[in-house]
Amino acid sequence: MDFEPKIIVFCCNWCSYAAADLAGINRMQYPHNVWIIRLMCSGMVHPEFIMDALSQGADGVMVLGCHLGECHYRDGNYRALDRSDMVVELLEDFGYEQERFHLAWISSQEADKFVEVVSGMVNRIKKLGPAGG
Amino acid sequence: MGVTAAMEWLGSCSGCEIAFLNIGEDLVPLITETLDLVHAPLLMDHKYFGQCGEGVTLEIPDAVIGIVTGGVNNREHLTVLRQMRKKCRLLIALGTCATHGGIPALMNGQDQQASWQAIFKTVSTDPGAEIPEVEVPPPLDRVYACDEKVKIDMQLPGCPPNPELIAELLVAIVEGRSPVLPGKSVCDTCPARREGRSVVGKVKRFIENVEFDPGEPVSGMRCLLEQGFMCMGPVTAGGCNGGEGVPACISARVPCRGCFGPVRKNGNQLLDMMNGLASNGIDFKSVVDRRSILRFSGAHGRLRPLKKRVAKE
């Protein structure tokens, strides 16, 4: 059987979740491997969320936020950016490949970019295989 | 006579037992009136297989309170721990090895086979050295904390645990009340002066001296983390000062090493520390050998061997 990865996507309420919503309204096709979790801001994704997701069966984690400078809370996504460098480095310490984490900026109108980013992630994780395997 | 108690040590250094003996004046009433020690391999003569070796099965007497120190590193530890669980009504994990893996769990961060090879078979060892297989209990696949193997009723971390807290824990159990143990981080109990930002944007190594005035108390010293030293106070459970006063290492003007393990039971010291540094604009890449931040809490699968990267085609 083909490997169907499970990917947790943390979306911020103001931009990327709206983009995911728009993708649905537009009936755009994207892989069913993503589980979207809506948060108020990408800056509130504590690295522990990411590690917990991976250690409890997710094969990849994405954090999607507003474009830099467009954060509803002014600098939330800059925090997410600062942390993402650290998360990528630390993934290897905890025994995961760096590719299992992806950070992207998607505005509320970019439904096509949402589909593109998510499909790209699913393809990469499919090649990589299950986490912890 | 007091409440029966059994002490047992697994993969540990006996520091916790020394801390127990270090309770001071209160120790005498504690072990003569409050408790009745029935088994403690390190402190008294009670053997596993009968006093003259006539027994055939491992025997630990029944006790109300059981205290285990040390992590579970090999089969023998596992057998002893399970026996303790069977014989004791209340099992206490004492010390960071028992609660979070402690120093022995640093081994979890590297490949076990490679480690055995390095220890027994490298050029620096006697020629012909073999990895021992007989008369030595076989190691488990990694070092475990006690609560990964059996149910643990109470935990008191520390390397070593504070003697006052050990006494408080035991007396509270006997008196039937819940013990008053500190639940805050080292930072919460530290009086050093905090100004809210780091002086340097990166972490200094401890080959430089901390800036302080020896005549002044610790409350006059600038927070060590703000001075740029890798102080693990924010991510470490407090209690090394016995609940009040200056944390032990800070009182010696040395950064916290993290020996009480994470503040919350499931906390991850490495992740939380790095997150703290990154969110406060300190360059996390300036931390040398960051995996060693898990030096006291490497069990529970926190510390794992690094995955070898597969070369890309």
Image: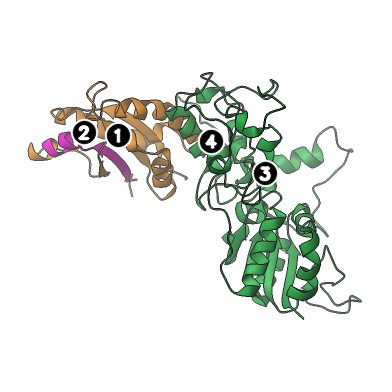
Chain colours: A orange, B green
SS state under label 3: helix
SS state under label 4: helix
* Residue drawn at x 66%, y 51% as measured from the top left: B242
* Residue stretch in magenta: A6-22
Side (left or right) of B262 relative to B254: left
What residue is shown with label 3? B107
Q: Is residue B304 visible?
A: no
Cα distance between the residues tagged 4 and 2:
29 Å
Percent position of residue B131, x then y: 79, 47
Percent position of residue B149, x then y: 60, 62
Task: Tell me where residue B29 sits by quadrant.
Answer: bottom right
What residue is shown with label 2? A16
Cα distance between the residues tagged 2 and 3:
42 Å
Marks 2/1 in contact by CB < 8 Å: the verdict is yes
Among the two numbered marks 2 and 1 on one chain, the one whose residue lies closer to the N terminus? 2
SS state under label 2: helix
What residue is shown with label 1? A42
Compared with B33, B11 (above or below) is: above
Cα distance between the residues tagged 4 and 3:
14 Å
Percent position of residue B76, x then y: 74, 63
Disc 2 residue type (three-letter): Ser
What residue is shown with label 4? A93
* Residue drawn at x 50%, y 51% as measured from the top left: B266
- Is label 1 on the same chain as label 4? yes
Side (left or right) of B202 relative to B140: left
Disc 3 residue type (three-letter): Met
- Was residue A12 drawn as part of the magenta stretch in this picture? yes
Viewer-proximal residue among B35 and B189:
B189
- Was residue B289 drawn as part of the magenta stretch in this picture? no
Q: Is residue B153 visible?
A: yes
Tell which tag, 3 or 1, sits nearer the viewer. 1
Among the two numbered marks 1 and 4 on one chain, the one whose residue lies closer to the N terminus? 1
